[in-house]
Image (cartoon, grey):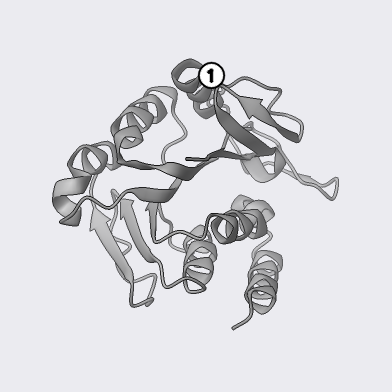
């Protein structure tokens, strides 16, 4: 399938699930994987609808990339991609044991973090997973603009969020030295990372590092 057709499928998926906040950034998740052209993708945090998973896997198919997902709950039936595997457990523990569990030394080229949106959890996930990243890598954080009212690019808003005290974005500030106004779109370089931020639907912050 051509990349343009695959992306159109993700756009249609997003339009069909507008009641779920992550719909607002599904095309961007797809685009970032395509840009990275990875061999290994790790997803921390799944869901029953598995929308982000579908965006990741659709892009992964373009390169024959492996996708590994982890969640505290059993979502082992949400994906039928042959190169996908699921690990049930805590994302922090999985990160510390990743190389042993993965059975090799392959570095993670794309990492998507969408866990409990809490400050302490996010800091611990960053610490656990940084050693597993490839020199050239992309790390995507969900819920970096989380509040009770979520805003969308078309000017609409929904009461789908909660006040997490800027948990995820504060963790990026304190652990990685990355700071910007998360309520607005942003693109720039912060502490060695190329940063792209989408504030819509609770936010998606993309960190890209070149070798």
Task: Kindly give the residue lying farthest to the right in the view shown.
Answer: 155
Task: Kindly give the residue lying farthest to the front in the view shown.
Answer: 211
At x 27%, y 53%, the residue is 106
157 sits left or right of 201 in the view = right
Q: Nearer the viewer, residue 65 or 20?
A: 65
Q: Position of residue 19 (x, y in %)?
A: 65, 58
Q: Position of residue 8 (x, y in %)?
A: 70, 73
Q: Nearer the viewer, residue 24 or 180?
A: 180
Q: Nearer the viewer, residue 29 or 147?
A: 29
Q: Is residue 18 above or below residue 197?
A: below
Q: Is residue 207 above or below residue 34?
A: above
At x 39%, y 25%, the residue is 123
Q: Quadrant of residue 133?
A: top left
Q: Which residue is mark 1?
A: 173
At x 31%, y 52%, the residue is 70
At x 59%, y 83%, the residue is 1
Q: Quadrant of residue 158?
A: top right
Q: Nearer the viewer, residue 14 or 97?
A: 97
Q: Is residue 75 above or below residue 88?
A: below
Q: Position of residue 67 (x, y in %)?
A: 37, 62
């Amino acid at each position: 399938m051509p990349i343009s057709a695959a992306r159109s499928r993700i756009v249609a998926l997003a339009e069909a699930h507008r009641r779920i906040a992550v719909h607002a950034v599904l095309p961007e998740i797809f685009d970032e994987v395509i840009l990275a052209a990875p061999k290994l993708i790790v997803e921390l945090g799944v869901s029953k609808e598995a929308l982000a998973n579908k965006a990741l896997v659709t892009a992964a198919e373009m390169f024959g990339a492996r996708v590994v997902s982890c969640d505290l709950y059993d979502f082992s039936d949400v994906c039928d991609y042959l190169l996908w595997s699921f690990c049930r457990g805590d994302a922090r523990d999985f990160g510390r044991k990743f190389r042993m569990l993965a059975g090799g030394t392959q570095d993670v080229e794309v990492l998507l973090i969408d866990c409990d949106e809490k400050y302490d959890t996010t800091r611990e996930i960053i610490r656990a997973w940084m050693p597993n990243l490839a020199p050239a890598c992309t790390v995507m954080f969900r819920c970096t603009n989380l509040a009770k009212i979520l805003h969308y690019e078309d000017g609409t808003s929904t009461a789908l969020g909660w006040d997490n005290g800027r948990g995820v974005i504060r963790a990026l500030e304190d652990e990685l030295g990355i700071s910007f106004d998360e309520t607005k779109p942003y693109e720039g370089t912060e502490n060695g990372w190329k940063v792209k931020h989408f504030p819509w639907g609770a936010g998606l912050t993309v960190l890209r590092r070149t070798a």
